[in-house]
Image (cartoon, rainbow, N blue to C red):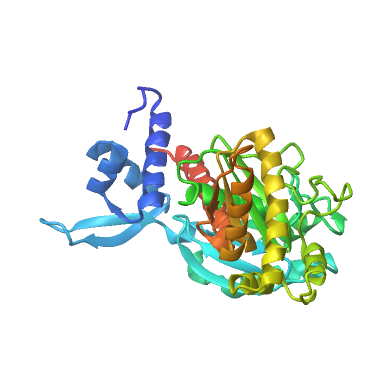
């Protein structure tokens, strides 16, 4: 680790304290010797900073290390009372939540129905009740919630869905009820962030996540950074123009699936997953449906490639089903001589959005906690 240059003592203390806090968040409970190895700080510096952090109740004793030779060494950890974060995924039918400590460890999980239409208060009540049900006193105060939702999300947290723009009303109402900072994010963007940290996109710092969940959506990562666009509309590929379709017609959603099922002699009331299972079992009509849907997705991927040139596409949601993956790769092979396209399957499947929210919530929680600790300790007389 490169040591910072000499400077004012308060600056050095802050830098050293942040290094130790980040090490404890990254690794969990550590001894002084382990903190020296993680941060590159001297024993004296580690001891001085830990004393300051202990006085500020930022760290607490976490038992002893008896696994190594010699006298047992005391471990320290981030104080559990510093607070927790909530990661939330709201889909078209339900909500899932995870409560996290500052290290990103999941303390509790829960899920339940969520009203996607109706009064704003009903939606806020449903999510508040779900969060309250999984929060435990030992978690500390709820400091931040990161909520992934379907729909276009602007930079200020306003949601635009089938009902129209809400002007940030959901975020504001939820903040008032929970008494903490609330960050709203598009669900597919959070899934893309999860894939960025996962294994499917390893070796690809520029990729597009394509997911099917009632409709088709995309999350765009370029040069290792998620790209939301100026108004949050980046990745809304559902209505990209396609040959034979009217401008503004959806490429792939529940209505499209129902129409294709009817055309191919299958039950239009069945969800896409049922048709996928039938295709996997060899049903010829379902296989024809998958070929048509895969062809549409290939045109979307080709359009994205000609503009952004990602090195791969990650298939998620129902697009990660083996029957659909096979159809997509076959369709891609047919155009490979014109435009080579690489497809990989999601590392996380349907859990990607919640995992992306977990990562974002952990980062925001750590920054809020660490900034508060360092501001507080800098004002403490020494």
At x 80% / y 49%, what residue is drawn?
239
Q: Tell me, yes or no, if residue 94 can be seen here.
A: no
Which of these two is toward me, 145 or 312? Answer: 312
The reply, left or right, for residue 168 in relation to residue 198 is right
- Whether residue 255 appears in this view of the structure is yes
Location of residue 370 in the rendering, given as x and y in whole percent from the top left corner: 48, 45
Q: Residue furthest top?
A: 6
Tell me which corner region of the image, top left, top right, bottom left or bottom right, holds residue 179: bottom right
Residue 5 occupies which quadrant of the picture?
top left
Q: Within the image, what quadrant is residue 87 found in?
A: bottom right
Residue located 49% across and 56% down the image: 82
Residue at the location (35% across, 52% down)? Answer: 27
Quadrant holding the N terminus: top left
Q: Position of residue 296 (x, y in %)?
A: 73, 52
Residue in front for this viewpoint, 91 or 97:
91
Please tell me how many numbered marks the rendered image carries. 0
x, y percent for residue 159: 78, 52
Whether residue 137 is situated above or below residue 296 in the rendered picture: below
Could you tell whether 56 is left or right of 351 in the image? left
The image position of residue 226, as x and y in percent, is 61, 41
Compare residues 16 and 133 and report the one nearer the observer. Answer: 133
Q: Quadrant of the C terminus?
A: top left
């Amino acid at each position: 680790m490169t040591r910072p240059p000499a400077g004012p003592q308060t600056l050095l203390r802050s830098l050293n304290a942040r290094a130790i806090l980040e090490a404890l968040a990254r690794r969990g409970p550590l001894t002084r010797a382990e903190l020296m190895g993680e941060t590159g700080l001297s024993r004296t510096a580690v001891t001085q900073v830990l004393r300051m952090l202990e006085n500020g109740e930022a760290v607490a004793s976490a038992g002893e290390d008896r696994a190594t030779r010699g006298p047992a060494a005391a471990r320290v950890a981030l104080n559990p009372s510093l607070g927790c974060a909530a990661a939330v995924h709201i889909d078209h039918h339900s909500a899932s939540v995870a409560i996290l400590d500052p290290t990103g460890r999941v303390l509790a999980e829960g899920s339940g129905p969520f009203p996607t239409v109706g009064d704003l208060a009903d939606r806020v009540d449903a999510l508040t009740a779900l969060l309250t049900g999984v929060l435990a006193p030992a978690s500390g105060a709820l400091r931040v919630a990161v909520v992934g939702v379907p729909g276009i999300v602007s930079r200020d947290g306003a949601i635009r869905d089938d009902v129209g723009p809400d002007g940030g009303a959901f975020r504001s109402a939820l903040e008032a009820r929970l008494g903490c900072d609330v960050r709203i994010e598009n669900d597919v963007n959070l899934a893309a962030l999860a894939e960025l940290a996962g294994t499917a996109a390893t070796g690809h710092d520029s990729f597009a996540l394509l997911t099917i969940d009632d409709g088709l959506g995309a999350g765009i990562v370029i040069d290792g950074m998620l790209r939301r666009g100026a108004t949050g509309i980046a990745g809304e590929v559902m209505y990209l123009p396609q040959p034979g379709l009217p401008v503004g017609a959806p490429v792939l959603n529940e209505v499209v699936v129902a129409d294709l099922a009817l055309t191919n002699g299958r039950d239009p009331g069945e969800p896409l997953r049922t048709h996928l299972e039938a295709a996997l079992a060899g049903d010829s009509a379902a296989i024809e449906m998958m070929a048509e849907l895969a062809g549409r997705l290939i045109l979307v991927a080709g359009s994205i490639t000609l503009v952004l040139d990602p090195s791969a596409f990650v298939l998620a949601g129902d697009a990660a089903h083996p029957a659909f993956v096979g159809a997509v790769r076959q369709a891609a092979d047919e155009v490979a001589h014109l435009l080579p396209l690489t497809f990989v399957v999601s590392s996380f499947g349907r859990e990607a959005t919640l995992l992306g929210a977990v990562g974002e919530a952990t980062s925001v929680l750590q920054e809020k906690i660490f900034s508060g600790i360092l501001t507080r300790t800098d004002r403490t007389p020494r």
